[in-house]
């Protein structure tokens, strides 16, 4: 007797094939009507092929694999009772801290930096 997991894999395979067929049909229509328009079929293919939905129990046991998939650009959604609960997305790397003096020589502070501004400049500010 097939398990729920094997049925869901078969279902996802059928959906993937269907999405590819829709994409191909969309490409044909978009080339025929307007070659500059992007078709909705490719968005459907991305959603069906590049997204993973798992239940909480599977997420606990397969967390490392799911993290790798999220880092590779796939949409990973963790579900509870068939409803989306959380989405795994990679965090952009934090900016490096600035090093004091790293721009030395690229900019020279003029000698008159702290002198009062001329009347023309002050008038421009109203």
Image (tube, grey):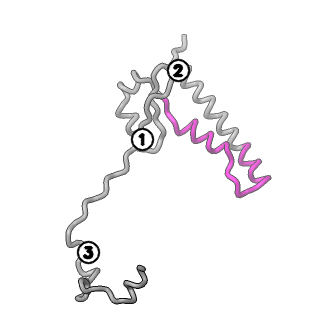
Mark 2 lies on residue: 6
Task: Name the outermost residue toward the top.
Answer: 1
- Mark 2 crowdedness (10 Å alpha carbons): few <14, some 14-19, many ≥20: few
Picture quarter with the N terminus: top right
Q: Position of residue 110 (x, y in %)?
A: 26, 87
Up-down: is 70 above or below 55? below
Q: Position of residue 38 (x, y in %)?
A: 67, 51
Check disc 3 and report its element: helix, strand or loop. loop
Residue drawn at x 74%, y 51% as measured from the top left: 30
The Cα–Cα distance between marks 2 and 1, rounded to whole angstroms, is: 26 Å
Give the magenta part as a residue range: 25-53
Magenta highlight: main SS: helix
Picture quarter with the C terminus: bottom left
> Does the magenta segment cover residue 40?
yes
Up-down: is 92 above or below 10? below
Mark 3 lies on residue: 103
Q: Is residue 114 left or right of residue 62?
A: left
In contact (CB < 8 Å): disc 3 and disc 2 = no
Which circle, 2 or 1, is nearer the viewer? Answer: 1
Mark 1 lies on residue: 89
Q: Position of residue 4 (x, y in %)?
A: 52, 17
- Residue 11: quadrant of the picture: top right
């Amino acid at each position: 007797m097939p398990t729920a997991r094997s049925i869901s894999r078969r279902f996802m395979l059928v959906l993937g094939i269907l999405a590819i067929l829709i994409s191909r049909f969309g490409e044909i229509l978009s080339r025929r009507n307007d070659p500059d328009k992007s078709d909705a079929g490719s968005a459907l293919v991305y959603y069906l092929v590049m997204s993973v939905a798992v239940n909480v129990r599977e997420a606990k046991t397969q967390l490392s694999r799911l993290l790798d998939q999220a880092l590779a650009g796939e949409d990973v959604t963790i579900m509870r009772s068939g409803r989306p609960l959380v989405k795994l997305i990679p965090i952009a790397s934090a900016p490096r801290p600035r090093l004091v003096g790293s721009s030395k020589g690229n900019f020279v502070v003029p000698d008159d930096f702290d002198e009062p501004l001329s009347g023309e400049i002050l008038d421009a500010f109203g």
